[in-house]
Image (spheres, grey):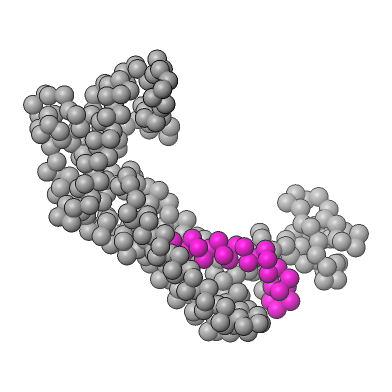
Amino acid sequence: MTRGAYVFVAFVYLVLGASFLASTATMMREFYGYEWLTMLLTHSHLFLFFPLFGLLVLAAFYLPSVAFAHMYWYHVPYGRLRFIFGIFVAVGLSLGVSHLLTSAHPRGIWEIAPNAIRADRGVPANCRANNVPCERAPIGEVLGVLARGKPEPAWLSEFARSCTRDKLLPATAIFKEERYCFPAMRMLPGDACCTAQRRFKDDVGALSANPRTRSQAADLDIIFMPFKVFFIVVMIVVALMLAVWRNKMDTHYKSKVPSIERGIISARSPCCSGRSWTTAISRQPTFCSDGNTAPSNGAGAS
């Protein structure tokens, strides 16, 4: 494989990885003086899991991507044209999907500027300070209650309300009973809590849609989102190609196969004379397609 393929893929993957980290860094910088850790943990799937998962996947798929880039450029009929066309398709798909994601509802609390969260007093205004039942509690206080809740992973399910029940059917006893309703920060039956949830969702959406109250992290996320979608598209394509182009990988990059993807592309055994053999996870003997037994010292899985 040529150095150009290594450099091209490395550049693209470095840009993608940097966009993952930049998304988290911009949120932490903006909320550093106001519950940044709470915001980070509350939206950990966006700002912790995705960046870490993305970086690990980029590292694992680097060599396969280099191999496929080189293969299309040199070994596939009309490969260069198909490669460039595929990039344009992936970019267009990423832009379209990212537009749908950034305009979808509901929106996240992190998309509201810290000053706007501080200024929010709930509905009616100052309901908590005046000991008046809140139709919708202050957003910052709701966020704090969520962050300081019980440590059990599934504890929120105890308070969850399903507001999509069939109106033609009678409400169940569980739906009628009072539970703690986070958007109102008080005990409410099902219908009242669903109303508070809708009010909370609508108010968060309105604040995040207003340029004066939208966070900088939300504005920058519009830029970062296409990179995240492009990453997912590329990883799906590479994973499919690892299966579809298995024989071509063996033909052109046989010496690189063990390094490219040990867990996806099976290795070759010395006893099989170039024919594939099935490796076992355990220490049991592994048999080649010609009936011979492969070595069990672990060399066959490398």
191 lies above or below 104? above
Q: Is residue 239 magenta?
A: yes
* Residue 139 place in picture, x, y as percent: 21, 39
Q: Nearer the viewer, residue 29 or 294?
A: 29
Q: Is residue 228 left or right of residue 40?
A: right
Q: Is residue 60 visible?
A: no
Q: How many marks?
A: 0
Q: Quadrant of the C terminus?
A: bottom right
Q: Nearer the viewer, residue 167 or 26?
A: 167
Q: Residue at x 27, y 40 (%)?
A: 201
* Residue 205 place in picture, x, y as percent: 25, 46
Residue range in magenta is: 228-254
Q: Residue at x 28, y 35 (%)?
A: 198
Q: Residue at x 56, y 71 (%)?
A: 65
Q: Is residue 119 left or right of residue 199?
A: left
Q: Quadrant of the N terminus?
A: bottom right
5 lies above or below 227? below
* Residue 158 place in picture, x, y as percent: 39, 26
* Residue 294 place in picture, x, y as percent: 84, 60
Q: Main secondary structure of the magenta part?
A: helix
Q: Residue at x 58, y 66 (%)?
A: 238
Q: Is residue 282 magenta?
A: no
Q: Nearer the viewer, residue 289 or 228?
A: 228
Task: Specify the quadrant of the image occupied by residue 204.
Answer: top left
Q: Nearer the viewer, residue 100 or 262?
A: 100
